[in-house]
Every structure is written in C-alpha cells, then in structure tokens.
Amino acid sequence: MLKKTYYTHLVNQIPNNVLMRFLIRQVNKAMKNADSQWHLVSRYRKPIKGQKYGNCGSLQRRYARRISLYLEERPCYTRDKRIELAGFQQ
C-alpha cells in the first residue's frame, strides 16, 4: 500500500491571472481588518515554457501559470497581542 503524501498548501492549482490575484488581495485585506492572526501567502508554481524554478523553488509571478496558497501567521501578530486577545494580564 502506498503512503499518501500531505502538503502544506491550503489550495493549489489556482490560475495565475488578474482576477485571482485581486481576490487573494481582497481576502487578505478582509482578514487584516478583522484582526486575524493569519494571512494568505501566494507562491507561484508551474513555470511557463522556457522558464525554470529559481533558488529554493522560487518563481516570479510573470513566469508562473498557477498559484498555491499557504496560511501563515501575520508577522506583526506578536505574543503580546495573543495574550491581550486571550484576556490575560502580565
């Protein structure tokens, strides 16, 4: 029996076009306005013909056919903010 491979992306194989990038930006803005500790990070995948992946698997937006989305903690969301939201005092 083969083992199933699990990946860390939230969604993959999203077409890399203006509409999808706009929608991803809108979702990130809504998450920020809601004081979410998370945000979506786009990584570009599937190089167009004649292009290759760069260092560490990076790919420029203009050379990608697909987008993968990852959920990451917002960098400015510090431990103090988490404590404040939980209602604890230091």
Image (cartoon, rainbow, N blue to C red):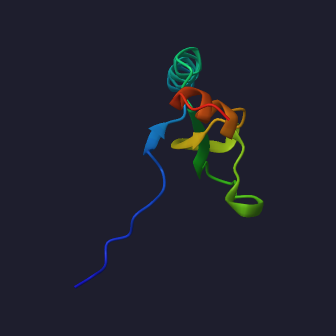
23, 72: nearer the viewer: 72
4 in relation to 37, above or below: below
What residue is shown at x 57% (from left), y 14% (from top)? 33
Position in image of residue 70 (x %, y %): 53, 44
Which quadrant would the C terminus be assigned to in this image? top right
Position in image of residue 10 (x %, y %): 44, 45
| Direction bottom: furthest residue | 1
The answer to which image quadrant residue 76 occupies is top right
Q: Can the viewer see residue 78? A: no
35 in relation to 67, above or below: above
Position in image of residue 79 (x %, y %): 67, 40
Q: Can the viewer see residue 71? A: yes
| Direction front: furthest residue | 90
What residue is shown at x 51% (from left), y 21% (from top)? 27
The answer to which image quadrant residue 2 occupies is bottom left
Which quadrant would the N terminus be assigned to in this image? bottom left
Position in image of residue 63 (x %, y %): 67, 43
11, 35: nearer the viewer: 35
What residue is shown at x 53% (from left), y 22% (from top)? 31
85, 88: nearer the viewer: 88
What residue is shown at x 31% (from left), y 78% (from top)? 3
Position of residue 52 in the picture relative to residue 2 (left or right): right
